[in-house]
Amino acid sequence: MIFSEPAACYRFTAGQAFSALAAAHPSRSALRLPDRVVTYGELDAAADKIAHLLRNREIFRRSVVGIVHTKTVEAYATMLACLKSGAIYVNLDETNPAERLERIFSTCRPRLVVGEALPEAARSAAASVGAATLDWAEPAARRDLAAAEPGPPPGANEVTGTDPAYIMYTSGSTGTPKGAVMTHANVLNFAAWARARFAIGADDVLTNVNPMYFDNSVFDFYAALLNGAALAPVPRALAGDAQACLKAVEAAGCTLWFSVPSMLIYLMLMKALAAARLPKIRAFIFGGEGYPKPELRRLHDMFGGRARLINVYGPTECTCICSARDIDPGDLEDQAGLAPLGPVTDNFDFLVLDDDERQVAPGEVGELWLRGPQVALGYYNDPERTALSFRPNPLNAAWMERCYRTGDLVRLGADGRSLSFVGRKDNQIKHMGYRIELEEIEAALYRIDTVAQAAVVYKPGQRGFKHIVAYVAGEGIPEAAELRRQLRLTLPDYMIPQRFDARAELPRNANGKVDRRRLAETAD
């Protein structure tokens, strides 16, 4: 571990680390919301009361709590309450359809689902697994919270660094999302590295434009609140409005920006992002998808003189980020491809292996395997997929060393350490920063009665970004609007294809399978 002097590492659990910061700096800003500022002391006190309320509802160590996270004070406090009491939180998209939530709940089996003005889909999914609900919009819930005991929750000292802290769900090829389980030790190590790598301190304010059910939010939450900085939540409604988003970030006095590249490109497309905006931002951090170099050049020309541009990489299964690189002009001389990756984090390591699980030579391409203290426990209640992705190091015969197989193909640099992203081994994509298994979209298409054949591909679009295209065949295929309507019954919006192509029959290869390569090469 790199638990040296960072404030995040005073204790063995993330909940205790936050409590130590709140005790030392109770009046320091923790949350800078559009309408109010919440101090560390206030947020800690709210988390303690919610932790007692959870205990009263029979939420104990390692119980799973679903949080329909709409960036309210209570939502952040509930995350901290779970960390303090040893419960495992899972943040949920308030727009998810009931069927997808039911598939998530079928694996994580929450005992309680918490939120404010809980949507009917969340209530229905909770009922499907017998979970209780707690809705902060209901007067009874507010009365219970007001009457809850103050002070640390009972059982807090029983929680250890090996206990799970949260579950983060990603798309699954079988149609069932996968829930990566991260421990308190994982996030403490990550927060300490983030503090050192990005020089995060008490004067910093980190943006929270990322949705809380999205992996990038792990950086927002832990890098801020376990390092004594402030977090500036930008609600969904503001994040979708370019001008309103930037105004909210400026009003909060944000010093560090973190988002997917497509968010920054969107802000420039909307003519909202200009050199005079975001005067306090000292670093733009971006990750979750590749940044096309022509677009990154525009950002560099606009802000490169006064702010660092940092490209980060990391899978959900390795606590959000495990690599960072400061972009310099030399990285952008060649305008082809994506921004280069940086070295992996301190005390973390990697392998680049061929199909026979042997180390590739510098200059060769192989699959990236990651190893170190940020590797997840596995997938929650999913031993089969855990066994496929979390593997013993094949190059270490001396002892059992767990690695995560990323499925990412990378080229090993001449120095034996630098990496360049090449592509994927499977049919997984990163779209707007979301990790998506195209097979999950295909599975949803096959649930539509008239669809006899379906194939989903990821094709180049405008300005270097790609879009999801669904090819379907069958009798009586409905119009695109109706296909989108039916898909929204089972998929979140970010997984809905941007284009549909209905055909009499889809091409097949020599093995009789749908030929995705031919479809991908088809001109739009």
Image: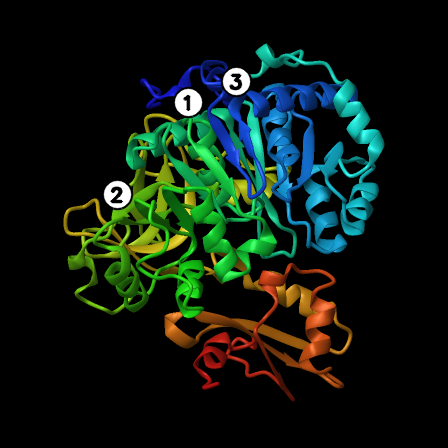
Q: Nearer the viewer, mark 2 or mark 3?
A: 3
Q: Earlier in the sequence, mark 1 or mark 2?
A: 1
The amino acid pointed to by label 1 is: Ala
Q: Which residue is mark 3?
A: 19
Mark nearest the camera among 1 and 2 is 1
Which mark sits nearer the N-terminus, 2 or 3? 3
Q: Is residue 21 left or right of residue 48?
A: left
Which quadrant is the N terminus positioned in?
Answer: top left
* Mark 2 nearby-residue class (10 Å; few <14, some 14–19, many ≥20): some
Residue 89: x and y in percent read: 63, 33
For the residues marked 1 and 3, what is the alpha-carbon distance in whole angstroms? 10 Å
> Between 188 and 234, which is closer to the camera in this rendering?
234
Q: Earlier in the sequence, mark 1 or mark 3?
A: 1
Residue at image location 56% in from the left, 73% down from the top: 498
Instruction: Estimate the spatial distance between the alpha carbons at disc 1 and disc 2, rounded to whole Å.
Output: 23 Å
Give the vertical position of 463 relative to 216 (above or below): below
**Residue 8, disc:** 1
Question: How many residues crowd mark 3 within 10 Å: few (<14), some (14–19), many (20+)?
Answer: many
Along the line of sight, the residue nearer the viewer: 346 or 409: 346
Q: Is 398 placed above or below 282 here?
A: above
Disc 2 to disc 3: CB gap under 8 Å: no
Give the amino acid at mark 3. Answer: Ser
Looking at numbered disc 2 in the image, what kind of residue is underneath it?
Pro
> Which residue has dot 2 on it?
343
Compared across the picture, whether 517 is left or right of 347 comes to right
Mark 1 crowdedness (10 Å alpha carbons): few <14, some 14-19, many ≥20: many
How far across and down, in percent of the image, does residue 336 sit? 25, 69
